[in-house]
Image: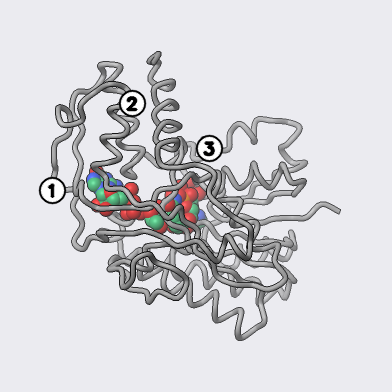
Amino acid sequence: MNKKAFITGITGQDGSYLTEFLISKGYEVHGIMRRSSAFNTERIDHLMDNEEIMNKKLFMYYGDLADGTNLSRLLEKIKPDEIYNLGAQSHVRVSFDIPVYTGDITGMGTTRLLEAVRETQIKTKFYQASSSELYGLAQEVPQKETTPFYPRSPYGAAKLYAYWMAVNYRESYNMFACNGILFNHESPRRGGTFVTKKITRALANIAAKKQDKLFLGNLDAKRDWGYAKDYVEAMWMMLQQDKPDDYVIATGETHSVKEFLQEAFSYVGLDWNKYVEIDPRYFRPAEVDLLIGDATKAKEKLGWVPKTNFKELVKIMVDADLKEAGVNK
Ligand code: NAP
Ligand code: F7E
């Protein structure tokens, strides 16, 4: 019998790549989407429009991490072998504007899902989408599984609570629960308000002469940027182990926002200094200055290594946006 996976956040960047990956592995994938007045399934429409896949390999339900009763009912019905909790209010800057909602969905939503597993008593494996934002004001460089946490935003604090709830359910109820502490990972499917996609989309519009300015915030922040497609494989690998554990997933390289701009603009022969302006609206009340991960444990225990480096990632994203804007390079 095919394995069944249940995914929250299936309509997001990671959910869409994970769904493709699991289907390629022969899984039946079950996902929840939020009811919305506008279409919100753009990233998985190519799967939902495919008759071979839809309702044979992919099953969609309305659901929300705010609604624990529905989560229990769905788990009881589906009885998934694996659960991937990717759903979240995932924007750090926005979490300062809506801290209570972020706490409810990103934090408490995890507990609702863990409780639904406990209540239904299904035998399953649980993946929690933890984040390098747990490290925030980094206490060690590079950051690894044993580095103390110091979140710097409502999002980071909500993810910290969710991280510990996953550990708690593992230790209290013997649940197979893993935390993937993933550093920033990007792709052409990245949401348009995250800095990488904001840059590559604007660059393509500048190249197409549809835009002449790009407004950004702090250009000095440094991130360990990897490719989302590589990272979803690590999620799956964690759930294939004999024992549940927590793993850092990262490239081990760090670059500033400025370096991302330089790499992207020079790839199309433009000087970013001519187009970028600083808008303080994009500054955060507290910033995370430097993230760089050490994924040695994932390499040794899971056999996971990143396949895509920084330069390749920038190229993948710029090429996709140029194509979208109708620009021939
Ligand atoms: P994303 O593109 O923002 O996707 C988030 C997903 O969560 C979307 O499917 C969204 O649905 C869904 N969602 C939002 N509110 C929800 C709610 N109330 N109930 C159920 N689902 C809800 O994020 P991502 O980049 O794929 O990241 C996936 C997960 O990994 C998130 O938990 C994120 O916090 C975490 N993470 C991301 C990174 C990264 O660099 N990408 C790094 C570490 C951890 P809609 O499509 O309807 O909005
Ligand atoms: O910001 C700076 C900003 O919003 C990166 C989420 O997936 O990764 C992501 O969180 C940096 C920050 O991602 C703009 O100040 C400058 O220092 O792309 P971002 P993030 O905050 O690192 C972690 C691991 C997650 O878990 C999150 O879910 O870029 N920056 N100018 C800007 N950022 C944005 N968004 N917009 C700007 O105009």
Which sits in the foreground, 221 or 304?
304
Tell me if residue 199 comes above or below residue 161 in the rendering.
Answer: above
318 on left or right of 40: left
* Amino acid bearing label 3: Arg
Q: Tell which circle, 3 or 1, labels the residue nearer the N-terminal end.
A: 3
Mark 1 Cα shell of 10 Å, populated few (<14), some (14-19), many (≥20) = few
Asked which quadrant contains residue 139, the reply is bottom left
The quarter in which the C terminus is drawn is top left
Residue mark closest to the camera, 1 vs 2: 2
Chain-order first, disc 1 or disc 2: 2
Q: Position of residue 172 (x, y in %)?
A: 61, 86
State yes or no: Cβ of the residue under disc 3 lies below 8 Å from any atom of ligand 1: yes
Q: Residue 280 bears which disc, if any?
A: 1
Q: Is residue 155 above or below residue 257?
A: below
The local crowd at label 2, few if under 14, some if 14 to 19, many if 20 or more residues have their Cα within 10 Å, is some
Establish if 166 lies above or below 255: below
* Rendered image: mark on residue 166: none
Residue type (three-letter) at the residue carrying disc 1: Pro
Amino acid on which disc 2 is placed: Tyr
* Distance from Cα at disc 2 to Cα at disc 3: 26 Å
Callout 3: helix, strand or loop? helix
Q: Which residue in the structure is indicated by mark 2?
A: 267
Check residue 43 in the rendering and tell me which mark sits there, or answer none.
Answer: 3
